[in-house]
Amino acid sequence: MGTRRTGARRARRLAAGLVAVGMAAAGCRSAEDELRLQVADLADRRIAAAASFEAALAHRDPQLRREAARAAGRIRATDLTAALVRALRVEEDAATRAEQLFALGQLGGAEALGAVLAHLEHADALTRARACEALGKLGRPEVASSLIARLQDERGEVRGAALLALARLVGRRSGRREPLDPAVAEGLVGALAGLAAQPEAGVAWKAAYATAEIDGAGRLPAALAAARSTDPGARFFAAQALGRIAEEPARRAESLCALLADPDVFVATQAALALSRLPAADGNEAQIAALEQVARATIRRSDHHLRRAALATLCDRAEASAPSVAPERVAQWIATAGDDPKLLVRAEAWRAAVCLGSEADVGAVVRRAQKEADVHARVAAIRALAAAKGARAGIAANALLPLAGDPDAYVASEALIALLAHADASAAAELRAELRTLALREAEDVDFAVAASALDLLAKVGAADDLPTIEATFARMLGDDAAEARANATKAAAALAPAAAVPLLVRAATDPSAAVRAAARAELERLRAPVPLEPAAGPDSPPSSVELPAVARLRPGPDPRVRLRFAGGDVVVQLFATEAPLHAAMFRERVEERLCDGLPIHRIVSGFVVQGLDPRGDGWGTGGLFLRDEINPVPYERGAVGMPNAGPDSGGCQFFAMLMSAPHLDGRYTVFGRVIQGMEVLDALDLGERCSAAEVLE
């Protein structure tokens, strides 16, 4: 951390102390204020002090009760479930009930289910919606029929909440192994088509999302209805659903080809990607011709997403049915995209060259990985080499081995990650031995990202004798920045020396980082070894590294706005000073201190996120910050700004902004702002583009 930043921190700390002393001396701080500050501090330190929360949840001020419920949900300790349930039973304020239900969904616990179910038919619509949301998080599939009943609710927000809850509860990400009861499944699928056609805001896209997420026959009518919606979000998830449904491939292909011409670039992009899931023989030539047309699209500034997706699908189709696609046609796709002005598209062309091109094409990608001037281009070429198969895999692996020792940590760590793809059991014994030697050497690197990536590789190619190196790396990787390296050490140790690794895992289970503790505890459970109790948080538990004066915690100011300047225009973000005060303060502070100027966008996933402002430029950086999650009910819809992390309570200084809605992130990552101007600039960003300057707008 630089001297300037440290000095600014000290000044703020002093100011905070002066404010606190001044308020106390003047007798300004009431008992209510003291309780509010106490609850905020308990939440920040993750201390589940039941007595304090009982008092705050029963306070006469509804705002304090809401803050206490929010804080309890952030602590994630089921010890507080009973207090929340008691408060919910007597709560008369609708906004406070909503916070209590949201918190119960975050906490879980045996007592939560009955209390939430009891509010599913409440007279207040917000209460019903939050009850639906909470049920979706509690992981009890038997409540699916209760949620399906709410799909007929008179209020659209309740129907939408029930749809998202069902997708979370029984969808493909839920981990559910047992099929739904046939009658329940029939009722759900039967309702989806009608909901996907509803004009009410937010219902159609949520029905389309549920259609894409929940497996089962009979979903095609709902997907086709959503594809005709006026809501681009509904069409986006309709395209996803059409790629995942198994029935009537010709009809699905027809609808997807129509969506390739959609006015919304992300709908068209999703349609292009979905076509790769269809059987290659069905309408192959017509689909290829349609994809070739959009692969040259240049109408909108953001069409590079569409060009990349079309090329990816063309190459996937060519791999699936190589004899039916002329090699010269494939060569033309690669050559055209390889000259694209956008790195996002060129990177896809390099992957295509590695998968479908000649040995000379693979060699050209190798040279890019070695010699491109821009590190993001080098990394894109390295990721392309990870896709090599067959004879090309040997060429790729031989090129990646020296790159894993590159002086640039971003290049080195990505080369190690790429080598994982070439380290399976079928790899030659000589290559596996080289990889093991490499992983052992790079695990000793001073850079935590390189060491963490090396440990991942070592877990795949190492041996029990490597445990001392793993233990030494764990002991050396100190601090919040290196938490992911310590987590990877626990996984490598458990994979290579299960019995001997238990002492390391037990030590890691009490690590200061919640992410490391979670990784270690998961490995101990998998090994059926005793799991130590989660260490109890106390007054000495570390708070988030961003500090707020007492007055700011008691009376947050208006939401500040910041402007991020890019070559293509400005993006204005409104920060949520009330919903996520520490994150908002962090972002504002970094902008004020010019710490965001010149930082790159290092990650773009079409139709999902744009991520950047990492001072390392590679996604591993935190800026020396440690922020506990400030989970809140703001949904991850288009324009939402969130905090990436490497596990619970590991926020830093980066940001990601949503290109489309992503309900699976709700309640899992902190939303701390939203884009209020310049979404078209965000849509048009490319890998490696930099924020030239950032400023706070007063």
Image (cartoon, helix red, strand yellow):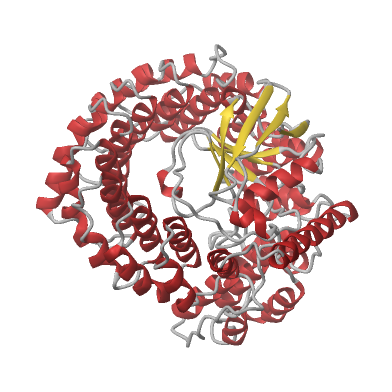
Q: Which quadrant of the rendered structure holds the N terminus?
A: bottom right
Determine whether, in the image, residue 123 is placed left or right of residue 548: left
Can you see residue 154?
Answer: yes
Corner quadrant of residue 31: bottom right
Q: Residue furthest left?
A: 183
Q: How many marks?
A: 0
Q: Which quadrant of the rendered structure holds the C terminus?
A: top right
- Residue 494, position in %: x, y? 56, 77
- Residue 697, position in %: x, y? 70, 32
Can you see residue 77?
Answer: no
Q: Which residue is pictured at 58% across the width and 59% down the height? A: 427
Q: Which residue is pictured at 84% across the width and 52% down the height? A: 407
Q: Residue furthest top?
A: 299
Viewer-side residue, 204 vs 482: 204
- Residue 53, position in %: x, y? 46, 71
Determine whether, in the image, residue 251 is placed left or right of residue 520: left
Determine whether, in the image, residue 667 is placed left or right of residue 133: right
Corner quadrant of residue 554: bottom right
- Residue 611, position in %: x, y? 62, 41
